[in-house]
Amino acid sequence: MSISDFLKKWWTIKTSTKNVKVEDLFATSSSNWVNNKSHVDSDLNIVSYGDKKEDSEVIAVVNDIFLHAMKSKASDIHIEPREKSVNIRFRVDWNFIEYKEIALIFRDSIIARVKIMSYLRIDEHRLPQDGKIAYKLFGWKSVDMRVSIIPTIYWEKCVIRLLKKDDKPPELKDLWIMPYNLVKIKKHLKDNYGMILAVWPTGSWKSTTLFSLLSQFNPKDQNISTLEDPVEYRINWVNHTQINPAINFTFAKWLRSLLRQDPDIIMVWEIRDEETAKLAVEASITWHIVFSTIHTNSATHTIQRLVNLWVDPLLISSSLRMIISQRLARKLCTHCKIVYKPNDKIKEYIVWKVWKYIKEKDDINLYKANDSWCEHCNHTWYSWRVWFYEVLEMTDKLETLMLKNASRLQLEIQAIWDGMIPIKEDWLLKVILWETSLEELLAVLGT
Ligand SMILES: [Zn+2]
């Protein structure tokens, strides 16, 4: 039986409209459609799972999943064992797209195949495991895959995050930053030293803003070094370092070593602990520009978080230049969205919040999804993403408040007084201008 016939037989076909048919994959050649230049090629011997023929079939199934995930521009692949089958679904723009349901007979060998590709133990079924795959498919950019395997009641569930190695970070102008925030950001990129933080509560794509900021500098004129986990984008002339948590060498230890490398600009992936926070702050007051991220809910929460990490408020006030708080939401699909007029109550609320920025207060349009079937977004109504920002600049008054141990609310009021546009206002403006929905705003930010 050819691999093509085999796949046709064993897949329980439950294909979404976007997916390529199995036949299409084998239109040219059934033997060389996959060209894995990494270690994947040499891993064809899943001896414990049957003879060579069966092995190549399992490899084809796994490659088929990877190929379709890449074609669908998925950020994650979920391989989920159920009672009677294995469910494969992709996360695309935050939405799940169900790819296929696979016969149970494949369950163990698919997970084993992924484990082999990511150098994990195939005989370990009780404990979670994390690994990596460097994957290259013929005609496609190479992709780094982060593999996470965790036991469930029906066998091990596998989630694979896809990171495209060759992708360039987006330009600042592509990040939907409103002019009032862009002016502040560009001003602080000209500072000679100091710390710039990007913050958000949860969610992926956190590195996008940081890398867009980094790409504003000329790495040939300066020593730009990063500490990352994982490395998502690669910029020419920038020294990217992948942190390896497995060898128990923390961010703080890496940062200490990096400071001996004569850096001008440092990007530390994340400040999680006291030692990293202190080192990053100290580095930024000794004529380095430090970019980093912290998990917090807002710009003013970040100041408190740094204080909670036992960083001296005096040092924070002399090092911190700017905090960019960001949120990510889904953008309405351009093919199925419809425009509508809000009712008076909603209109009043919008005008009350953003009256400063809009001229035509009576002519406010909102957008929502049309309920009809849309093949462009797979009937998810959303396609691509949009960012929302709150940019806090450190001012003398904020510094004074911080040194007095002011509450978050006091800091927030002062920051707004000093020119910070609250994230909800930035969002409302984008709801009117850039076609995301009010429902999405409420879902992400709350009322
Ligand atoms: Zn659509």
Image (cartoon, helix red, strand yellow):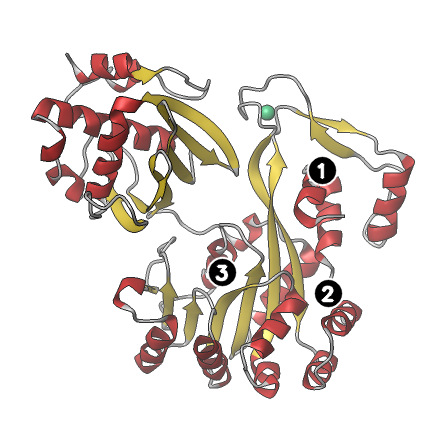
Pointer 2: what residue? 420
Q: Residue at x 68, y 56 (%)?
A: 179
Please tell me how crowded label 2 is: few (under 14), some (14-19), or many (20+) other residues with Cα within 10 Å. some
Instruction: In the rendered view, tell whether residue 204 sits above or below residue 224.
Output: above
SS type, badge 2: loop
Within 8 Å: ligand 1 and the Cβ of disc 1?
Answer: no
Q: Residue at x 79, y 69 (%)?
A: 413
Measured Cα–Cα span from mark 3 to mark 2: 20 Å
| Amino acid residing under circle 1 | Glu
* Label at residue 16: none
SS type, badge 3: helix
Q: Considering depth in this image, is 224 or 202 the residue closer to the camera?
A: 202
Tag 2 near tag 1, CB within 8 Å = no
Pointer 1: what residue? 439
Please tell me how crowded label 3 is: few (under 14), some (14-19), or many (20+) other residues with Cα within 10 Å. many
| Image-quarter location of ligand 1 | top right
Q: Quadrant of residue 56?
A: top left
| Quarter occupied by the N terminus | top left
